[in-house]
Amino acid sequence: MNRYEHGGQVYDAAGNVGDWLDFSANINPLGLSEKILHALTENLRGVTNYPDPQATELKRAICRRYGVRESNLVLLNGAAEFFYLYLNVTRPAKVLLPVPSFSEYERAARAASCDVKFFVTQAADNFAVNVDALCDAAQNFDCVIIGRPNNPTGNLLDAEKILRLAQVTKVVVDESFIDFTDAESVRKFASDRIAVVQSLTKIFAIPGLRLGFAVVDEQLATRLNLSKDVWNVNFLAQKAGAAALSDEDFLRRTRAWLSTERKFFVERLSKFRGLKIFPSTANFVLLKFNTVAAAEKVLLDLRREKILLRSCANFAGLDGSYLRTAIRSRAENLALLTALEKSLEVSQ
C-alpha cells in the first residue's frame, strides 16, 4: 500500500467512477444541497471565463459564515493545499506530528525538506493526546500539525490545550471536520502562533471541486497569498462555495443526522465480536480487529460486495489491523453492517 494513499479510490482502470458503496472517504452522505446544484447549473457556462482572482463573492461568504476578517483569509484548492503552501513559505526546520494523523501532513513536511518526527499516541488511551507530554516534546520543534477532530481517530483537542501548545511552538490546526461537530472552532485564536485550516469539501460533499480556506495572521496571509497560484480556486468552486455557505439549514440537518446516525452505527458495531470501536466526535469511526489477517479478510469480503472501507495500514502509529469507516445514510450503514456480519461470521 502506498504510504500516502487515501480513501475514495472509486475509479476503474479507465478512470471511470465505479459502482462502489464508499465508506473509505468521509463525505457528507446528504450529498449536494439544492443551493449548490442550482449554483453549478446556473453558472456552468461561466467556465469560459477565468475565475475571479480575488474570489470576492466567496471570501464575503466565508467572512459572514465564520466571522473572520478577509485580511486573514487564504483560499485553497482543498485544505490539503495549505500544508504544502504553509510549510514551503515558512520553512520550519523541524516538524512534530502527533500520530496517527492525516498523511498529507507528513508528505507536505518532507516535500518542504523539514525534519519530521512523530509523537505517537496509544490505543490504550483511545489515541488521546497527552498535552503535557506533547508540550514537553514540542519544545525542540518549530511547528506542530494537529487535526481537530483528528483523522483517523476522531479525537478533538480542547481549545485551551491548543493555546497551551502554542506557547511552546507554532501550531497548525486542521479543522477540516469541525462543521460536523458542535465544538467551537479555534479560528478566532489565529495569530502568528496559530494557523487554522478548514476543508469545505467534506461537509458540503464537493471533494471533486476542491475547496478550503485558512485563517492566519494578517502578515502571513499576505505572504501565503503571494506564494500561491492566483487562480487556485476555480470558477465553479467559488460559486458552489458561496452558495453552500448561505445554506444554514443544510448544516443543521447534517449535524442532526450525524448525532442520530453515529449513535445507531456505533451501537450496532459494538455487537460484533473481535472488534474494538474507538470513540469519535466526527463522521467516521476507527475500528481495530484482533489481527491484521482478520482486517484484511474483512476488506476483501466487503470489496466483493462493492463496499469500500479504509485500511489504516499506511497511517503512522497504526497497522493493518485497523480500518476506518465513514458514517453514511441509514440504508447504506445497514448494508455495511449486514456485509460485515456475514464476513465476521464466516471467520469465527
Image (cartoon, rainbow, N blue to C red):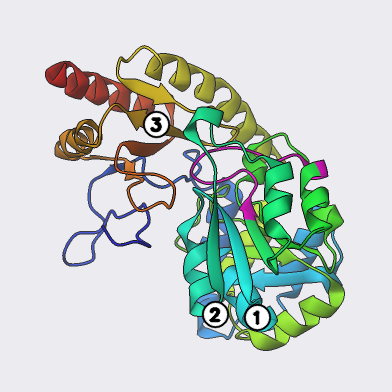
Q: Quadrant of the N terminus?
A: bottom left
Q: Write the start and end of the magenta stretch as one range.
A: 146-160
Residue 239, x across and y down, in percent: 62, 66
Q: Secondary structure at mark 2?
A: loop
* Residue 151 shown in magenta: yes
The residue mark sitting in front, 1 or 3, is 1
Report the residue that reaches farthest toward the top: 271
Mark on residue 112?
A: 2
Residue 335, quarter of the rendered image? top left
Q: Are marks 2 and 3 in contact (CB under 8 Å)?
A: no
Q: Secondary structure at mark 3?
A: strand
Which callout, 1 or 3, points at the residue further toward the start of the chain?
Answer: 1
Q: Is residue 25 left or right of residue 348?
A: right
Q: Is residue 268 left or right of residue 106?
A: left
Residue 290, x across and y down, in percent: 29, 26
The structure residue drawn at horizontal position 57% and vertical position 67%, both measured from the top left corner, is 237
Circle 1 crowding by C-alpha within 10 Å: few under 14, some 14–19, many from 20:
some
Circle 2 crowding by C-alpha within 10 Å: few under 14, some 14–19, many from 20:
many
User: Which residue is nearer to you in this view: 160 or 254?
Assistant: 160
Residue 339, x across and y down, in percent: 23, 25
Tell me the residue that label 1 is attached to.
91
Hey, what amino acid is under mark 2? Ala
Residue 129, quarter of the rendered image? top right
The structure residue drawn at horizontal position 21% and vertical position 21%, both measured from the top left corner, is 344
Hey, what amino acid is under mark 3? Leu
- Distance from the alpha carbon under mark 2 to that under mark 1: 7 Å
Hey, what amino acid is under mark 1? Arg
Which callout, 2 or 3, points at the residue further toward the start of the chain?
Answer: 2
The structure residue drawn at horizontal position 25% and vertical position 58%, both measured from the top left corner, is 11
Mark on residue 287?
A: 3
The vertical placement of 48 against 137, above or below, is below
Does the rendering let one see residue 67?
A: no
